[in-house]
Amino acid sequence: MPTIVIYNPLCGDRTAKTFFDEHVLPLFAKASTPISSIMNTERVGHAGELAQNELEKSGETLTIVLGAGDGTLHEIINHLSNAELKGARIGGPPTQIHLVLVPCGTANALYASLFPPKGGDSSSVEYKLQSVMSYLKGADPRLVPLTLAITTLSPPPAVASSVVVSTSIHASILHDSEALRATIPGTERFKVAAKQNGTKWYNSHVKLLPVASLRVVQLYDPDTKSFINHPDADDNDPWPVIDIDEYHAFGGYVRCNDRSAVFRSYHFDGYSRAREAFANKVWAILQGAYQDGAHVNLSYDDKGQITTEQTDNPYAVEYIRCGGWEWIPDDLDDDAHLVCCDGAISTIEKGGRAVCVAATPDKNAGFLVHV
Ligand SMILES: Nc1ncnc2c1ncn2[C@@H]1O[C@H](COP(=O)(O)OP(=O)(O)OP(=O)(O)O)[C@@H](O)[C@H]1O
Protein backbone atom coordinates (compact mmCIF):
# COMPACT_ATOMS: atom_id res chain seq x y z
CA MET A 1 0.00 0.00 0.00
CA PRO A 2 1.90 3.13 -1.18
CA THR A 3 2.34 6.06 1.19
CA ILE A 4 3.20 9.49 -0.15
CA VAL A 5 3.81 12.91 1.40
CA ILE A 6 2.29 16.08 -0.06
CA TYR A 7 2.85 19.40 1.67
CA ASN A 8 1.92 22.95 0.81
CA PRO A 9 5.02 25.08 1.51
CA LEU A 10 3.00 28.31 1.50
CA CYS A 11 0.12 27.40 3.79
CA GLY A 12 -0.24 28.87 7.28
CA ASP A 13 2.99 30.44 8.49
CA ARG A 14 4.96 28.70 5.71
CA THR A 15 6.71 26.23 7.99
CA ALA A 16 5.34 22.97 6.53
CA LYS A 17 8.70 21.94 5.01
CA THR A 18 10.63 22.62 8.21
CA PHE A 19 8.02 20.75 10.27
CA PHE A 20 8.24 17.71 8.00
CA ASP A 21 12.07 17.76 7.96
CA GLU A 22 12.36 18.13 11.71
CA HIS A 23 9.45 16.09 13.04
CA VAL A 24 7.44 14.04 10.54
CA LEU A 25 10.05 12.41 8.30
CA PRO A 26 12.33 11.36 11.21
CA LEU A 27 9.34 9.51 12.76
CA PHE A 28 8.73 7.60 9.53
CA ALA A 29 12.45 6.75 9.33
CA LYS A 30 12.49 5.54 12.94
CA ALA A 31 9.42 3.38 12.36
CA SER A 32 10.94 2.02 9.12
CA THR A 33 7.71 2.94 7.32
CA PRO A 34 8.55 3.59 3.68
CA ILE A 35 7.39 6.71 1.86
CA SER A 36 7.35 6.29 -1.91
CA SER A 37 7.53 10.01 -2.71
CA ILE A 38 7.72 13.38 -1.00
CA MET A 39 6.22 16.23 -2.98
CA ASN A 40 5.43 19.88 -2.39
CA THR A 41 2.69 21.80 -4.14
CA GLU A 42 3.92 24.38 -6.64
CA ARG A 43 0.69 26.18 -7.48
CA VAL A 44 -3.03 26.41 -6.79
CA GLY A 45 -4.70 23.14 -7.80
CA HIS A 46 -1.43 21.17 -7.85
CA ALA A 47 -2.24 18.96 -4.83
CA GLY A 48 -5.12 17.29 -6.69
CA GLU A 49 -2.94 16.59 -9.74
CA LEU A 50 -0.19 15.08 -7.60
CA ALA A 51 -2.68 12.81 -5.83
CA GLN A 52 -4.21 11.70 -9.15
CA ASN A 53 -0.79 10.86 -10.63
CA GLU A 54 0.04 8.68 -7.64
CA LEU A 55 -3.34 6.95 -7.72
CA GLU A 56 -2.88 6.01 -11.35
CA LYS A 57 0.44 4.25 -10.62
CA SER A 58 -1.14 1.35 -8.71
CA GLY A 59 -4.54 -0.13 -7.97
CA GLU A 60 -3.89 -0.24 -4.22
CA THR A 61 -5.24 1.97 -1.47
CA LEU A 62 -3.19 5.18 -1.37
CA THR A 63 -2.15 6.83 1.90
CA ILE A 64 -1.42 10.57 1.70
CA VAL A 65 0.44 12.25 4.54
CA LEU A 66 -0.83 15.77 3.99
CA GLY A 67 0.96 18.79 5.42
CA ALA A 68 -1.47 21.60 4.70
CA GLY A 69 -4.63 23.37 5.79
CA ASP A 70 -8.25 22.79 4.88
CA GLY A 71 -7.93 24.44 1.45
CA THR A 72 -5.37 21.97 0.07
CA LEU A 73 -7.41 18.97 1.24
CA HIS A 74 -10.47 20.56 -0.34
CA GLU A 75 -8.58 20.77 -3.64
CA ILE A 76 -7.60 17.08 -3.49
CA ILE A 77 -11.15 15.94 -2.70
CA ASN A 78 -12.70 18.01 -5.48
CA HIS A 79 -10.04 17.16 -8.05
CA LEU A 80 -10.37 13.42 -7.42
CA SER A 81 -14.17 13.56 -7.22
CA ASN A 82 -14.25 14.94 -10.76
CA ALA A 83 -11.25 13.10 -12.25
CA GLU A 84 -11.50 10.25 -14.70
CA LEU A 85 -8.75 8.02 -13.36
CA LYS A 86 -6.50 6.30 -15.89
CA GLY A 87 -3.47 4.00 -15.67
CA ALA A 88 -3.75 1.26 -13.06
CA ARG A 89 -7.18 2.50 -12.03
CA ILE A 90 -8.95 1.86 -15.36
CA GLY A 91 -11.84 -0.54 -14.79
CA GLY A 92 -10.72 -1.01 -11.17
CA PRO A 93 -12.87 -1.08 -8.03
CA PRO A 94 -13.90 2.11 -6.21
CA THR A 95 -10.96 3.93 -4.69
CA GLN A 96 -10.20 4.48 -1.02
CA ILE A 97 -7.76 7.17 0.05
CA HIS A 98 -6.36 7.19 3.56
CA LEU A 99 -5.24 10.51 4.95
CA VAL A 100 -2.69 11.28 7.62
CA LEU A 101 -3.23 14.93 8.48
CA VAL A 102 -0.48 17.25 9.65
CA PRO A 103 -2.05 20.63 10.42
CA CYS A 104 0.18 23.21 8.76
CA GLY A 105 -2.52 25.68 7.61
CA THR A 106 -4.01 28.72 9.27
CA ALA A 107 -7.23 27.42 10.78
CA ASN A 108 -6.97 23.62 10.27
CA ALA A 109 -10.65 23.26 11.12
CA LEU A 110 -10.95 19.61 10.10
CA TYR A 111 -7.94 18.59 12.18
CA ALA A 112 -9.24 20.57 15.17
CA SER A 113 -12.61 18.83 14.92
CA LEU A 114 -10.96 15.40 14.83
CA PHE A 115 -8.41 16.28 17.52
CA PRO A 116 -9.97 18.99 19.73
CA PRO A 117 -7.09 20.95 21.30
CA LYS A 118 -6.93 20.37 25.06
CA GLY A 119 -6.77 23.67 26.93
CA GLY A 120 -6.86 25.48 23.57
CA ASP A 121 -3.24 24.65 22.72
CA SER A 122 -2.94 23.70 19.08
CA SER A 123 0.66 24.81 18.55
CA SER A 124 2.66 22.02 20.19
CA VAL A 125 4.53 19.49 18.10
CA GLU A 126 2.83 16.69 20.00
CA TYR A 127 -0.62 18.08 19.14
CA LYS A 128 0.23 18.25 15.44
CA LEU A 129 1.57 14.70 15.25
CA GLN A 130 -1.52 12.84 16.49
CA SER A 131 -2.69 11.58 13.10
CA VAL A 132 0.90 10.59 12.22
CA MET A 133 1.28 8.67 15.49
CA SER A 134 -2.04 6.90 14.93
CA TYR A 135 -0.91 5.82 11.45
CA LEU A 136 2.54 4.68 12.57
CA LYS A 137 1.02 2.49 15.29
CA GLY A 138 0.27 0.18 12.39
CA ALA A 139 -1.92 -2.70 13.51
CA ASP A 140 -5.66 -2.12 13.84
CA PRO A 141 -5.71 1.42 12.39
CA ARG A 142 -8.40 3.83 13.53
CA LEU A 143 -9.88 5.38 10.41
CA VAL A 144 -12.75 7.86 10.31
CA PRO A 145 -14.60 8.24 7.00
CA LEU A 146 -15.18 11.84 5.96
CA THR A 147 -18.80 12.81 5.42
CA LEU A 148 -18.89 15.13 2.46
CA ALA A 149 -21.43 17.87 1.89
CA ILE A 150 -22.17 18.24 -1.81
CA THR A 151 -23.20 21.76 -2.78
CA THR A 152 -24.74 22.33 -6.19
CA LEU A 153 -24.58 25.95 -7.18
CA SER A 154 -26.15 27.95 -9.91
CA PRO A 155 -24.07 28.38 -11.96
CA PRO A 156 -22.56 24.85 -11.55
CA PRO A 157 -20.32 23.01 -10.72
CA ALA A 158 -21.07 20.95 -7.63
CA VAL A 159 -18.49 21.29 -4.86
CA ALA A 160 -17.61 18.62 -2.29
CA SER A 161 -16.68 19.85 1.19
CA SER A 162 -15.32 18.02 4.21
CA VAL A 163 -15.32 20.81 6.79
CA VAL A 164 -17.90 23.50 6.30
CA VAL A 165 -20.38 24.95 3.85
CA SER A 166 -21.61 28.37 4.84
CA THR A 167 -23.45 31.46 3.72
CA SER A 168 -24.05 34.80 5.46
CA ILE A 169 -21.51 36.05 8.01
CA HIS A 170 -19.13 33.09 7.71
CA ALA A 171 -18.96 33.27 3.91
CA SER A 172 -18.46 37.05 4.07
CA ILE A 173 -15.64 36.72 6.60
CA LEU A 174 -13.85 34.08 4.52
CA HIS A 175 -14.36 36.16 1.37
CA ASP A 176 -12.88 39.31 2.94
CA SER A 177 -10.12 37.52 4.86
CA GLU A 178 -8.67 36.16 1.60
CA ALA A 179 -7.84 39.73 0.55
CA LEU A 180 -5.94 40.14 3.85
CA ARG A 181 -3.89 36.91 3.51
CA ALA A 182 -0.69 38.64 2.32
CA THR A 183 -0.72 41.35 4.98
CA ILE A 184 -2.04 39.31 7.94
CA PRO A 185 -0.89 35.68 7.55
CA GLY A 186 -2.29 34.33 10.87
CA THR A 187 -5.80 33.82 12.24
CA GLU A 188 -5.91 37.55 13.13
CA ARG A 189 -7.13 38.19 9.57
CA PHE A 190 -10.39 36.37 10.35
CA LYS A 191 -10.99 38.77 13.27
CA VAL A 192 -10.33 41.82 11.09
CA ALA A 193 -12.72 40.49 8.43
CA ALA A 194 -15.29 39.69 11.12
CA LYS A 195 -15.24 43.30 12.30
CA GLN A 196 -15.85 44.46 8.73
CA ASN A 197 -18.98 42.31 8.57
CA GLY A 198 -20.22 42.61 12.16
CA THR A 199 -23.47 44.44 11.47
CA LYS A 200 -24.54 42.86 8.19
CA TRP A 201 -27.66 40.76 7.86
CA TYR A 202 -28.57 38.56 4.91
CA ASN A 203 -31.92 38.11 3.22
CA SER A 204 -32.86 34.84 1.69
CA HIS A 205 -35.44 32.12 1.30
CA VAL A 206 -34.42 28.85 2.95
CA LYS A 207 -35.68 25.29 2.66
CA LEU A 208 -34.50 22.71 5.18
CA LEU A 209 -34.64 19.12 3.93
CA PRO A 210 -35.32 16.17 6.26
CA VAL A 211 -32.60 13.81 7.47
CA ALA A 212 -33.07 10.81 5.15
CA SER A 213 -33.03 8.14 7.87
CA LEU A 214 -35.49 10.05 10.12
CA ARG A 215 -37.66 11.70 7.43
CA VAL A 216 -37.77 14.84 9.52
CA VAL A 217 -35.88 18.07 10.25
CA GLN A 218 -34.82 18.32 13.88
CA LEU A 219 -34.18 21.21 16.22
CA TYR A 220 -31.83 21.13 19.20
CA ASP A 221 -33.67 21.57 22.50
CA PRO A 222 -31.29 23.06 25.10
CA ASP A 223 -33.68 22.09 27.94
CA THR A 224 -33.37 18.36 27.26
CA LYS A 225 -30.02 18.66 25.47
CA SER A 226 -31.33 16.54 22.62
CA PHE A 227 -32.78 16.96 19.12
CA ILE A 228 -36.56 17.05 18.81
CA ASN A 229 -38.69 17.07 15.67
CA HIS A 230 -38.91 20.61 14.28
CA PRO A 231 -42.13 22.20 15.57
CA ASP A 232 -42.96 23.59 12.12
CA ALA A 233 -42.85 20.14 10.49
CA ASP A 234 -46.19 18.93 9.13
CA ASP A 235 -46.73 15.49 10.69
CA ASN A 236 -48.99 14.46 7.80
CA ASP A 237 -46.39 15.24 5.17
CA PRO A 238 -44.31 12.10 4.43
CA TRP A 239 -41.31 14.26 3.50
CA PRO A 240 -41.70 17.47 5.52
CA VAL A 241 -39.56 20.31 4.25
CA ILE A 242 -39.27 23.39 6.48
CA ASP A 243 -39.83 26.40 4.29
CA ILE A 244 -38.71 29.76 5.64
CA ASP A 245 -39.99 32.36 3.23
CA GLU A 246 -38.34 35.46 4.56
CA TYR A 247 -35.15 34.51 6.25
CA HIS A 248 -33.07 37.22 7.92
CA ALA A 249 -29.89 35.45 8.82
CA PHE A 250 -26.81 36.41 10.62
CA GLY A 251 -25.12 33.08 10.04
CA GLY A 252 -25.86 29.70 8.62
CA TYR A 253 -23.54 26.83 8.04
CA VAL A 254 -23.25 23.11 7.76
CA ARG A 255 -20.71 21.11 9.63
CA CYS A 256 -19.74 18.26 7.36
CA ASN A 257 -18.14 15.74 9.68
CA ASP A 258 -21.51 14.80 11.12
CA ARG A 259 -23.70 12.06 9.70
CA SER A 260 -26.21 14.72 8.74
CA ALA A 261 -25.90 18.35 7.85
CA VAL A 262 -26.19 20.83 10.68
CA PHE A 263 -27.58 24.26 10.07
CA ARG A 264 -27.09 27.04 12.53
CA SER A 265 -28.67 30.42 12.57
CA TYR A 266 -28.69 33.27 15.01
CA HIS A 267 -32.09 34.26 16.22
CA PHE A 268 -33.27 37.75 15.43
CA ASP A 269 -33.08 39.51 18.77
CA GLY A 270 -36.52 40.82 19.63
CA TYR A 271 -35.17 43.30 22.14
CA SER A 272 -32.62 45.40 20.33
CA ARG A 273 -33.06 45.43 16.62
CA ALA A 274 -30.40 48.12 16.31
CA ARG A 275 -27.67 46.26 14.47
CA GLU A 276 -24.76 47.93 16.25
CA ALA A 277 -26.15 46.89 19.62
CA PHE A 278 -26.94 43.40 18.44
CA ALA A 279 -23.44 42.89 17.04
CA ASN A 280 -22.00 42.86 20.57
CA LYS A 281 -24.41 40.14 21.58
CA VAL A 282 -23.53 38.09 18.55
CA TRP A 283 -19.87 38.15 19.49
CA ALA A 284 -20.81 37.02 23.00
CA ILE A 285 -22.76 34.17 21.41
CA LEU A 286 -19.89 33.24 19.11
CA GLN A 287 -17.45 33.04 22.01
CA GLY A 288 -19.63 30.19 23.24
CA ALA A 289 -18.86 28.32 20.03
CA TYR A 290 -15.25 28.08 21.18
CA GLN A 291 -16.30 26.74 24.59
CA ASP A 292 -17.21 23.29 23.34
CA GLY A 293 -20.27 24.56 21.46
CA ALA A 294 -21.82 26.17 24.57
CA HIS A 295 -23.56 28.81 22.38
CA VAL A 296 -26.35 26.35 21.50
CA ASN A 297 -27.54 26.59 25.12
CA LEU A 298 -27.67 30.41 25.35
CA SER A 299 -30.89 32.41 25.55
CA TYR A 300 -32.02 35.97 26.42
CA ASP A 301 -32.92 37.25 29.89
CA ASP A 302 -35.86 39.62 30.45
CA LYS A 303 -33.64 42.62 29.66
CA GLY A 304 -32.58 41.10 26.35
CA GLN A 305 -29.07 40.21 27.48
CA ILE A 306 -27.45 36.87 26.67
CA THR A 307 -27.67 34.38 29.52
CA THR A 308 -26.71 30.81 30.24
CA GLU A 309 -29.73 30.51 32.59
CA GLN A 310 -32.87 28.74 31.38
CA THR A 311 -35.59 31.30 30.60
CA ASP A 312 -38.95 31.37 28.81
CA ASN A 313 -37.46 33.72 26.19
CA PRO A 314 -36.17 32.62 22.78
CA TYR A 315 -32.89 30.80 22.51
CA ALA A 316 -30.07 32.81 20.97
CA VAL A 317 -29.16 30.12 18.44
CA GLU A 318 -31.22 27.72 16.39
CA TYR A 319 -29.28 24.52 15.94
CA ILE A 320 -30.92 22.41 13.30
CA ARG A 321 -30.18 18.90 12.08
CA CYS A 322 -31.27 18.34 8.53
CA GLY A 323 -30.36 16.23 5.51
CA GLY A 324 -29.60 19.32 3.46
CA TRP A 325 -30.73 22.81 2.66
CA GLU A 326 -31.49 25.17 -0.15
CA TRP A 327 -30.41 28.78 0.06
CA ILE A 328 -32.19 31.11 -2.34
CA PRO A 329 -30.75 34.61 -1.83
CA ASP A 330 -32.79 37.76 -2.21
CA ASP A 331 -31.83 39.19 -5.62
CA LEU A 332 -31.18 42.62 -4.12
CA ASP A 333 -28.78 41.36 -1.44
CA ASP A 334 -25.39 40.84 -3.11
CA ASP A 335 -23.64 39.56 0.03
CA ALA A 336 -26.29 36.88 0.52
CA HIS A 337 -25.07 35.39 -2.79
CA LEU A 338 -21.72 34.26 -1.33
CA VAL A 339 -21.21 30.58 -0.47
CA CYS A 340 -18.11 29.26 1.28
CA CYS A 341 -17.13 25.62 0.72
CA ASP A 342 -14.16 24.77 2.98
CA GLY A 343 -12.88 28.33 2.60
CA ALA A 344 -13.33 28.52 -1.21
CA ILE A 345 -15.84 31.23 -2.08
CA SER A 346 -18.40 30.92 -4.89
CA THR A 347 -21.03 33.42 -5.93
CA ILE A 348 -24.60 32.33 -6.72
CA GLU A 349 -25.91 33.99 -9.86
CA LYS A 350 -28.92 36.32 -9.65
CA GLY A 351 -32.08 34.23 -9.58
CA GLY A 352 -30.05 31.17 -8.59
CA ARG A 353 -29.67 29.08 -5.48
CA ALA A 354 -27.29 26.77 -3.63
CA VAL A 355 -28.43 23.28 -2.71
CA CYS A 356 -26.37 21.41 -0.15
CA VAL A 357 -26.84 17.77 0.86
CA ALA A 358 -24.85 15.47 3.11
CA ALA A 359 -23.41 12.44 1.32
CA THR A 360 -23.14 9.30 3.43
CA PRO A 361 -19.67 7.74 3.08
CA ASP A 362 -19.43 4.66 0.85
CA LYS A 363 -18.00 1.57 2.59
CA ASN A 364 -15.45 0.89 -0.13
CA ALA A 365 -14.62 4.32 -1.47
CA GLY A 366 -13.88 7.84 -0.37
CA PHE A 367 -11.60 9.53 2.11
CA LEU A 368 -10.72 8.18 5.54
CA VAL A 369 -8.54 9.91 8.12
CA HIS A 370 -6.21 8.21 10.58
CA VAL A 371 -7.23 9.37 14.07
N1 LIG B 1 2.89 26.52 -4.21
C1 LIG B 1 1.75 27.19 -4.07
N2 LIG B 1 1.69 28.50 -4.41
C2 LIG B 1 0.55 29.22 -4.23
N3 LIG B 1 -0.58 28.72 -3.69
C3 LIG B 1 -0.55 27.44 -3.34
C4 LIG B 1 0.58 26.60 -3.49
N4 LIG B 1 0.31 25.37 -3.02
C5 LIG B 1 -1.00 25.41 -2.63
N5 LIG B 1 -1.50 26.65 -2.80
C6 LIG B 1 -2.84 27.15 -2.44
O1 LIG B 1 -2.79 27.57 -1.06
C7 LIG B 1 -4.14 27.61 -0.60
C8 LIG B 1 -4.19 27.68 0.90
O2 LIG B 1 -3.78 26.48 1.43
P1 LIG B 1 -4.39 25.83 2.75
O3 LIG B 1 -5.85 26.07 2.82
O4 LIG B 1 -3.92 24.45 2.80
O5 LIG B 1 -3.69 26.69 3.87
P2 LIG B 1 -4.28 27.81 4.80
O6 LIG B 1 -5.28 28.66 4.12
O7 LIG B 1 -3.14 28.48 5.41
O8 LIG B 1 -5.00 26.92 5.89
P3 LIG B 1 -6.54 26.74 6.37
O9 LIG B 1 -7.32 26.38 5.15
O10 LIG B 1 -6.48 25.65 7.39
O11 LIG B 1 -6.95 28.04 6.94
C9 LIG B 1 -4.77 26.41 -1.24
O12 LIG B 1 -6.11 26.68 -1.55
C10 LIG B 1 -3.92 26.13 -2.50
O13 LIG B 1 -4.66 26.39 -3.68
Image: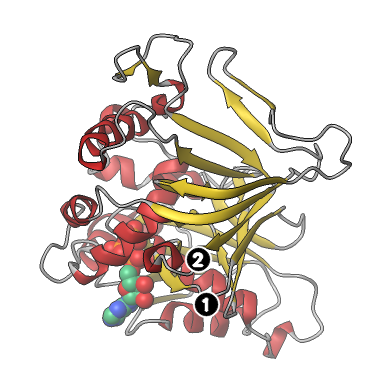
Q: Looking at the picture, does residue 22 appear above or below residue 214?
A: below
Q: Residue furthest bottom?
A: 87
The residue tagged with tag 2: helix, strand or loop?
strand
Of residues 350 and 360, which is closer to you in this image?
Answer: 350
The relative height of residue 206 versus residue 319 in the rendered view (above or below) is below
Q: Ligand 1 within 8 A of label 2's CB?
A: no
Residue nearest the viewer, comparing 112 with 100: 112
Task: Identify residue for label 2.
Answer: 64
Asked if residue 117 shows in the view, the reply is: yes
| Residue lying at 84% horizontally and 32% vertically, measured from the top left | 235
- Decide which of tag 2 and tag 1 comes sooner along the chain: 1
Q: Where on the image, by quarter, is ligand 1?
A: bottom left
Distance from disc 2 to disc 1, alpha carbons, whole Å, reads 8 Å
Q: Amino acid at mark 2?
A: Ile
For the N terminus, the image quarter is bottom right
Residue 176 point in image, percent of width and height: 25, 65
Q: Residue at x 52, y 48 (%)?
A: 247
User: How would you rate the neighbour count of disc 2 (Cα within 10 Å): few for under 14, some for 14-19, many for 20 or more?
Assistant: many
| Residue 51 numbered tag | 1
Q: Position of residue 337 (x, y in %)?
A: 45, 67
